[in-house]
Image (cartoon, rainbow, N blue to C red):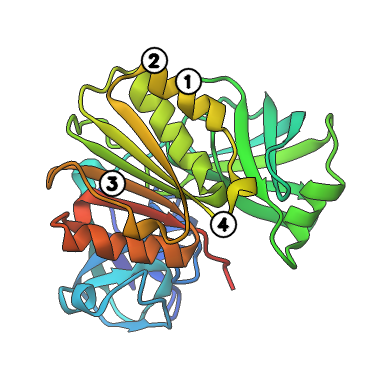
Amino acid sequence: MQITLEGYDRPIAVEAGDTILASLLRAGVAFPFSCQAGNCGTCKCELLSGDILELEHSEHALSAQERAKGIILACRSQVWDDTAIRRIDAEELVLHPSRVMRCRVLAIERLTEDIRGLRLGVEAGGPMTFSAGQYAQLEFASGLSRHYSMASTPDEPELAFHVRHMPGGRTSAYVATQLRVGDEVKVSGPLGISYLRDGHRGPVLLAAGGSGLAPIESILRTLLARGHPAPVRLYFGVRSERDVYHRALLQELAARHPNFSFEIVAGPLHEKMEPESADAMAYLAGPPGMVEAATAVLAARGLAARQIHADAFYDQA
């Protein structure tokens, strides 16, 4: 059996019952993916032909309307016959070389009571090229690895991350209590498709919940450094005042760039959001509930799916 990927020059061999994504990755085909558990929607593609079995997945990752149009999740589609697929939005797809790097902790900063800012230097395996808004897998010790978004910009030599201590989270607890400056960290990536669309020159809406500020901050600083001409508006959602961080950075950026403004929201973020116009591009990052509510509001305001790029923090489980 084989998978035919439109635009790829040769068929990909597949074992019966393997998922489309597993087969593509085993063959060394560059294909966007993230959670590998049907929660994020990163690996959406169009099924052109073939017999597949769809495994359980989140409604957020793939809606009933999308399924009716032949859209599937590569990570949750088992192959049982010759299959043909097509990437979605291939004209917007940016693929960077995948890297596995040895990094060193250069600094640990207490951003809030439960969020740590990490700054890592790349010692081997780099450099990692990525698009603002993407993320990587960080492995701090055997069995202690998680996905975290880059808060640094692609133009900076060091990598920055915001790690929130999650209740019951072994990896985030390790970062909060045991990680030290000088420790080694393995960084693999980049991952994700909720990245800055360089070709868009219109208004931009940014929404971040908690440590979801990391990828949004990367997008924001990249946009402003490149002289984005249109209005850029950020909504930063927090539980309370003590969860606010990088306020001084946002104030300084707003002072230097008249087209940038921001609002810190304590409470439901989606109730405050208002896109500048129907041609705005939106980037969202934060807890799944926040992302889903914000996506629904923006869709109701007239933004198409291709204008809304979301990175919800889902567990693989």
| Residue 285, horizontal then vertical, whole percent | 44, 51
Left or right, 159 with respect to 39, comes to right
From this view, report whether residue 292 is shown above or below residue 217.
below
Residue drawn at 32 percent across, 39 percent down: 94
Disc 4 marks a residue whose amino acid type is Arg
Which residue does the numbered mark 4 point to in the structure image?
Answer: 239
Disc 1 marks a residue whose amino acid type is Glu
Circle 3 — which element?
strand
| Residue 242, horizontal then vertical, whole percent | 65, 47
Q: Between marks 2 and 1, how big is the CA–CA gap?
A: 6 Å
Q: Between marks 4 and 1, how big is the CA–CA gap?
A: 23 Å
Residue drawn at 52 percent across, 59 percent down: 313
Residue 282: mark: 3
Circle nearer the N terminus (1, 3): 1
Left or right, 82 with respect to 176, comes to left
Left or right, 140 with respect to 147, comes to right
Q: Pick the residue in front: 27 or 266.
A: 266
User: Are the residues at dot 2 and dot 1 in contact (C-beta closer than 8 Å)?
Assistant: yes
Residue 256: mark: 2
Which residue does the numbered mark 1 point to in the structure image?
Answer: 252
From this view, report whether residue 274 is shown above or below residue 3.
above
Depth-wise, is mark 3 or mark 2 nearer the camera?
2
| Residue 22, horizontal then vertical, whole percent | 47, 65
